[in-house]
Image (cartoon, coloured by chain):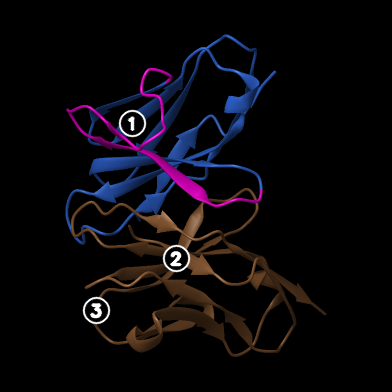
C-alpha cells in the first residue's frame, strides 16, 4: 500500500516550452502533496506544499509563476514548469501525505528527471 | 529554523561489518526524525522514524537509530552491512504536527565493498 507514482519518469524539452509532471497517490487519498527538487548529488529541497482545492504554498525563492502547481483532486497533483530553461533541469520528486492516519507520514514518488535543452 | 547535519557525505564499509551513519539535528521542543534511503532510479523509502516514543527505533532491513536529546543526535546503525544496502541515506527532521514539512540533510552515500 501507500504507492505514489509520477509521470513521466523522464522528459526532455526544448528551452522556452512548458512541461507538466503528474503525481498520483494510487491507493490512498492525499489532502496534502509536496514537490521537491533535487540537484545532482545534493539533497531534496522543498519547493511547495499543495493542498487539495486550494492554492499551493511556495517556499522562499521559488517562483510561483514559473512552477505552477495544481491539486485538483485527492489523488492527483501536477507541477508545470513554464517557459523552461536549462537551469530548470533537475530531478523533481513529489510526496503525498495521507488524509487519514499519521499526519507526518509522507510517501514519495520515484521522481521525474527533467532535461531542458 | 529546523535543520539536520549529516556529518559524512560518503561512508564505505566492507560487507558484514557494522554501519554507522551520523546525523545531528537543531534543537527543538519536539522533533520528529526520520531516515530515508534512496536507491538509484527509485523513490525514497522510509527506513524508520522517531516521534517521541521509544528513543531506540528499529526500522526495516535491520537498521536502527537512537534518539539522543543530550547530544541532539539520531545516528543510523546496522550490525552487518549487505551489498544491497549501498544507496544514499537522508536524515530528515520535522517539527510541525500536521502535514509536516520535512527538512532533509545533505545525504550520505553508503558504499559496501566485498
Q: Give the camera-side residue of A80 and A109.
A: A80
Above or below: residue A40 compared with residue B5? above
Nearer the observer, disc 3 or disc 2? 2
Q: Which class describes the residues within 10 Å of circle 1: few (<14), some (14-19), or many (20+)?
A: many
Q: Residue B107: x, y in percent?
A: 57, 61
Q: CA distance from mark 3 to mark 1?
A: 31 Å
Give chain A's shade: blue
Q: Which quadrant is the N terminus of chain B positioned in? A: bottom left
What residue sits 65% from the left and 12% below the top? A14
Residue on which the image places disc 1: A77
Q: Is residue B20 left or right of residue A52?
A: right
Q: Secondary structure at mark 2?
A: strand
What range is drawn magenta here? A41-66
Q: Are marks 3 and 1 in contact (CB under 8 Å)?
A: no
Element type at mark 1: strand
Residue marked by disc 3:
B52
Q: Which sits in the foreground, A36 or A23?
A: A36
Amino acid at each position: 500500500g501507500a504507492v505514489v507514482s509520477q509521470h513521466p519518469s523522464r522528459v526532455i524539452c526544448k528551452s522556452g516550452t512548458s512541461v507538466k509532471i503528474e503525481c498520483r497517490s494510487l491507493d490512498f487519498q492525499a489532502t496534502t502533496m509536496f514537490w521537491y527538487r533535487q540537484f545532482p548529488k545534493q539533497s531534496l529541497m522543498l519547493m511547495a506544499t499543495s493542498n487539495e482545492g486550494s492554492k499551493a504554498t511556495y517556499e522562499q525563492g521559488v517562483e510561483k509563476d514559473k512552477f505552477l502547481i495544481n491539486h485538483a483532486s485527492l489523488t492527483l497533483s501536477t507541477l508545470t514548469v513554464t517557459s523552461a530553461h536549462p537551469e530548470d533541469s533537475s530531478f523533481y520528486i513529489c510526496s503525498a501525505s495521507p488524509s487519514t492516519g499519521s499526519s507526518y507520514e509522507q510517501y514519495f514518488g520515484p521522481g521525474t528527471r527533467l532535461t531542458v535543452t | 529554523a529546523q535543520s539536520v547535519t549529516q556529518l559524512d557525505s560518503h561512508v564505505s564499509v566492507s560487507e558484514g561489518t557494522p554501519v554507522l551513519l551520523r546525523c545531528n539535528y537543531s534543537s527543538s521542543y519536539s522533533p520528529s526524525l526520520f531516515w530515508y534511503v534512496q536507491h538509484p532510479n527509485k523513490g525514497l523509502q522510509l527506513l524508520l522514524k522517531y516521534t517521541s516514543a521509544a528513543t531506540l527505533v528499529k526500522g526495516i532491513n535491520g537498521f536502527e537509530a537512537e534518539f539522543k536529546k543530550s547530544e541532539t543526535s539520531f545516528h543510523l546503525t546496522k550490525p552487518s552491512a549487505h551489498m544491497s544496502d549501498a544507496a544514499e541515506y537522508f536524515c530528515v527532521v520535522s517539527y510541525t504536527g500536521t502535514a509536516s514539512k520535512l527538512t532533509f540533510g545533505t545525504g550520505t552515500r553508503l558504499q559496501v565493498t566485498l
